[in-house]
Image (spheres, grey):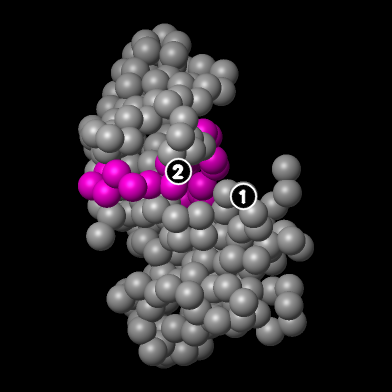
Amino acid sequence: KQEVTQIPAALSVPEGENLVLNCSFTDSAIYNLQWFRQDPGKGLTSLLLIQSSQREQTSGRLNASLDKSSGRSTLYIAASQPGDSATYLCAVRNTNAGKSTFGDGTTLTVKP
Amino acid sequence: EPEVTQTPSHQVTQMGQEVILRCVPISNHLYFYWYRQILGQKVEFLVSFYNNEISEKSEIFDDQFSVERPDGSNFTLKIRSTKLEDSAMYFCAGKGTGTPFFGQGTRLTVV
């Protein structure tokens, strides 16, 4: 059974800092891994998707890496801004049509 | 970007009542999913649906839950007799050949 863990559970940083969020998964035979953003009481916004054959993906100030063999992914946020404050969720799929298994998320607060 | 639409955005119901949550996937979607997120907890898988039948379900998806695609467009989740603990955000997702697209969720409040 796939299990996804995210560390830390919460993170508070001053504006402008670079930061790393961590995601680990127990079954390394994944199909892909996706990072989402969730604002309080809102839906899921997809940020980055990494296929199992890829090592990283970048979008603007965000960079996600994947080390499938060790069961880890990181989300790097450069030059953080108060608008980045949200909960960041990691989700993995083990097959193309299979379910997504989510982590508990990391709640990020960026202070002005 | 194409969207998966969920209605209503918020529903309040009395305990014991039946509720139907609706999802309109993108037209070429073949696979459909429901997830729920209890306040402050992680997003949990409920059920997946393909070719008009359930392909996988979790232990949460008991006899009180059912899904169907009645008109080939809408994908619905029915809870027959709601309990207080069914209060949660429910997310629908649809998938064609690529990655699933998630809807913005329906917040269900059982009082």
Q: Is residue B67 above or below residue A63?
A: below
Residue at image mark 2: A32
Q: Is residue B40 above or below residue A69?
A: below
Q: Give whichever of A108, A67 is nearer the camera.
A: A67
How crowded pointer 2 is (Cα within 10 Å; few <14, some 14-19, many 20+) is rated as many
Looking at the picture, how far across and down is residue B110, in whole percent?
Answer: 42, 76
Identify the element where label 1 is drawn.
loop
Looking at the picture, how far across and down is residue B40, in whole percent?
Answer: 32, 53
Query: Is residue A43 at least partly visible in the picture?
Result: yes
How crowded pointer 1 is (Cα within 10 Å; few <14, some 14-19, many 20+) is rated as few
Report the Cα–Cα distance between label 1 and label 2. Answer: 11 Å
Quarter of the figure with residue A13: top left
Q: Which residue is at a point 46% across and 60% down the rendered structure image?
A: A98
Where are the magenta residues, as a range? Answer: A25-48
Which disc number belongs to residue A30?
none
Q: Would residue A40 be found to the left or right of residue A2 on screen?
A: right
Residue at image mark 1: B98
